Image: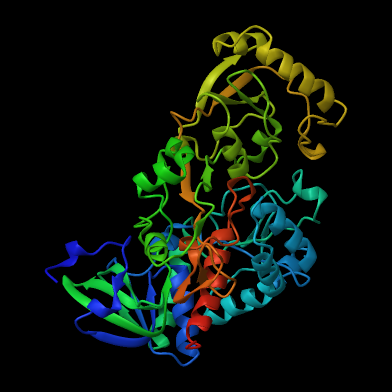
Amino acid sequence: MSGALEFSPSRAHPLSRVPRFDLQTDVIIIGFGAAGACAAIEAARAGSQVTLFEVAAGSGGTSALSGGEIYLGGGGGTRIQQAAGFTDETEDLFKYLVMAGGPNCDVTKVRAYAEDSLAHFHWLTDQGVKYKSSYVPEKIVEPITDDCLIWSGSEEAWPFVDAARPAPRGHCPQFVGMGGGRYLMDVLTLRVSESGVDVRYNSRALCLIQDESGRVHGVVVRSDGELRYARARSGVVLCTGGFVMNRNMVKRHAPLLLRSNRPIGTVDDGSGIRMGMSVGGAAINMSEGFVTIPWYPPESLVQGIFIDERGQRFINEDCYHGRVSQYIFQQPGDRVWLLVDRVAYQPPAFQEFARIEIGAAGETWEDVERDLGLPPRALTSTVEIYNCHAAQGADPLLHKARKWLRPLDQPPFVALDCRVDHCVYSSFTLGGLDTLPTGQVLNEDRDLIPGLYAAGRAACGLPRWGAGYSSGMSLADCTFFGRRAGRQAARREP
């Protein structure tokens, strides 16, 4: 072998061509985000010798860029939910997650998470993750204080509220300011170190090693500039993140996300997914992704209505900001506005970041319609119909909840510009390798790929439909199923 350029994540390296093994261990984990950390902790505690390869110079990955929020509940509720006066039954959590999972929901994974979510909360606190017993009732993206419990999805909005009793489930760690994901990763990184895991930073996985029977035996890595062959006696766990930073993969699999001008990720180049596919793993839901523009807080803006370039409403505005954004991306053209009146209007909290500006204003809705260049009656008829029903506390067209309904009839009137081609829309991918709840990777026939596991955004887990996403689902999925993948890999299956 002359060098790393001969290797590709898209091609497995034959076991018969391995000249030597520079490292042998029980479990190899690739990626040191939340999924990789939790897999490493559980595999090591199960008695396995664990080596973790991370391409960067430190832990964290995309998990460290997040707010650290984890979607938790069930079992009657966490102590924080109960202290805030909420009872969260397992069946309600289950039903909500099934709807959130969308048309290709993995009901088996949802059932596993719903039934063990409360125990997972206790596991997180046992690791040292601190949660303040406090509740934020307002609609926010994430707290800038060290408060914990928030409404992080569409739990109170149609159609979800018709299927499951709502409860706030977004659990943010006790961390002042936005960005609690770094705090979460620091806690998990310390536990990884205490568990005796051999962590190799500056180590890029180049390809998997596979024998003629299809079993995965290890990985070829470039570590500190040196090519190394690493053998895993029990299994390899892919925790490499999604593929949003690989714009060629996005173009091929999820072209709608190319409209987003702010992909969220660190490496997230799809290499883990490609390695899984190279040994026969099936990749599913690859067209799905999360996209959002933080248009609230303040929550008074929820009283407004979104219209597209035809002047038509298209979503109940009281649902999660990511669901609204998903529907924005599905509208024809790039022009979208949020219509509010004097009572509802306040500048969005993230106005400067998101570049949400006033697109038009006037003393009448006709003024606003004319300034936006819309055909006569396109906007005004939509507002008239909405106001007529809102005055009666109803929204028969899109079912916005009564608490948010009031006629938009107090001038001056404002159209907030949420254009897709101007404002900042953030995104990441939700598709990945098909796995069992144990993390075992499946092929197209849903047979196991021996010796291969995946978790986090390298796998297709709980969140797999952009229109159903709730904040905290990714870290819930990464930490919970990362733990399961680590335990399964430690079992040394034949």
Whole-percent x and y of residue 414? 60, 21
Q: Residue at x 52, y 48 (%)?
A: 289
Position of 457 with respect to 325 (left or right) is left
Examine the image and state in which quarter residue 201 appears.
Answer: bottom left
Q: Residue at x 71, y 71 (%)?
A: 78
- Does residue 87 appear in this view? no
| 51 over 473 or under it: above or below | below
User: Among all residues in the image, which is located at the extreme front?
Assistant: 212
| 399 over 13 or under it: above or below | above
Whole-percent x and y of residue 100? 67, 53
| 455 over 51 or under it: above or below | above
Position of 277 with respect to 484 (left or right) is left
Position of 189 with respect to 293 (left or right) is left
Quarter of the picture containing the N terminus is bottom left
Q: Of 390 and 228, which appears nearest the observer?
A: 228
Examine the image and state in which quarter residue 311 appears.
Answer: top right
Whole-percent x and y of residue 86? 78, 63
Q: Of 377 and 285, which appears nearest the observer?
A: 285
User: Among all residues in the image, which is located at the extreme right?
Assistant: 392
- Does residue 462 appear in this view? yes
Whole-percent x and y of residue 170? 63, 59
The structure's colour scheme is rainbow
Q: Residue at x 34, y 57 (%)?
A: 267
Position of 151 with respect to 431 (left or right) is right
Number of numbered discs overlaid on the protein picture: 0
